[in-house]
């Protein structure tokens, strides 16, 4: 299966304050799951081009969190934090997602969201992600920041990593 055969949808719903993404990957669910749950793999894909991701702290368990940066080639760094609410191995991850400072404190002036990711087996692995914002204004703010293009670029990097991991 080629990348062009894989489904990707991104839909923002201003009535429900949600973004819903469905993305198919030509890799086993266990490999896709590893890419979402292991810091050394997340660091290889979880940032849009040309940024790079770097984990500062990760405790992948319910009640734990992932604190990481995304850095531009010129050195500008943006910090984020995922607080893990629910983890069902190889099936589901629910996090609170927010921008943070370098120490991991969540930035209250930026939109925070609940992200629900579900992983399904089939001929391909399908990841359905529903991101819930508190308001239409928060949703519009992340759309205005380039969320759709950024996520698309980030998922393309995951495709490349999965191709590398599954070819070995």
Image (spheres, helix red, strand yellow):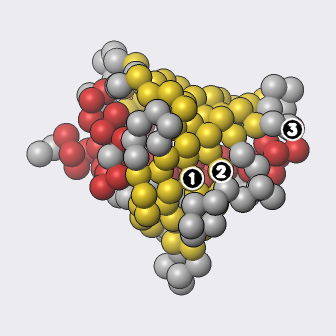
Q: Are marks 1 and 2 in contact (CB under 8 Å)?
A: yes
Q: Can residue 64 be seen in this snapshot? A: yes
Q: Can residue 22 be seen in this snapshot? A: no
Q: Secondary structure at mark 3?
A: helix
Q: Compare marks 1 and 2 and give the one earlier in the sequence.
A: 1
Q: Rate crowding at label 1 as few (under 14), some (14 to 19) or many (20 or more) other CA atoms within 10 Å.
A: many
**Residue at which label 3 appears:** 136
Location of the C terminus by quadrant is top left
Label drawn at residue 81:
1
- The spot of residue 125 in percent (x, y) is 36, 25
Q: Residue at x 52, y 65 (%)?
A: 70
Which residue ends up furthest to the top in the rendered image?
Answer: 122
Depicted 45 relative to depicted 162: above or below: below
**Residue at which label 2 appears:** 98
Q: CA distance from mark 3 to mark 1?
A: 22 Å
Q: Nearer the viewer, mark 3 or mark 1?
A: 1
Q: CA distance from mark 2 to mark 3?
A: 16 Å
């Amino acid at each position: 299966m080629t990348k062009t055969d894989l489904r990707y949808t991104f839909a923002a719903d201003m009535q429900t304050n949600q973004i819903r993404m469905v993305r198919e990957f030509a890799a086993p669910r266990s490999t896709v799951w590893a890419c979402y749950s292991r810091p050394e793999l997340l660091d290889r894909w979880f940032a849009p081009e040309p940024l790079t991701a770097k984990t500062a702290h990760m405790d992948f368990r319910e009640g734990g969190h992932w604190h990481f940066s995304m850095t531009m080639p010129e050195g500008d760094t943006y910090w984020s934090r995922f607080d893990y609410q629910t983890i069902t191995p190889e099936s589901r991850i629910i996090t609170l997602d927010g921008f943070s400072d370098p120490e991991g404190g969540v930035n209250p002036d930026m939109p925070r969201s609940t992200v629900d990711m579900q992983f399904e087996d089939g001929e391909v692995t399908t990841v359905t992600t529903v991101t819930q914002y508190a308001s239409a204004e928060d949703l519009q703010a992340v759309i205005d920041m380039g969320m759709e293009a950024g996520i698309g670029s980030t998922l393309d990097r995951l495709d490349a990593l999965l191709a590398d991991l599954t070819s070995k």
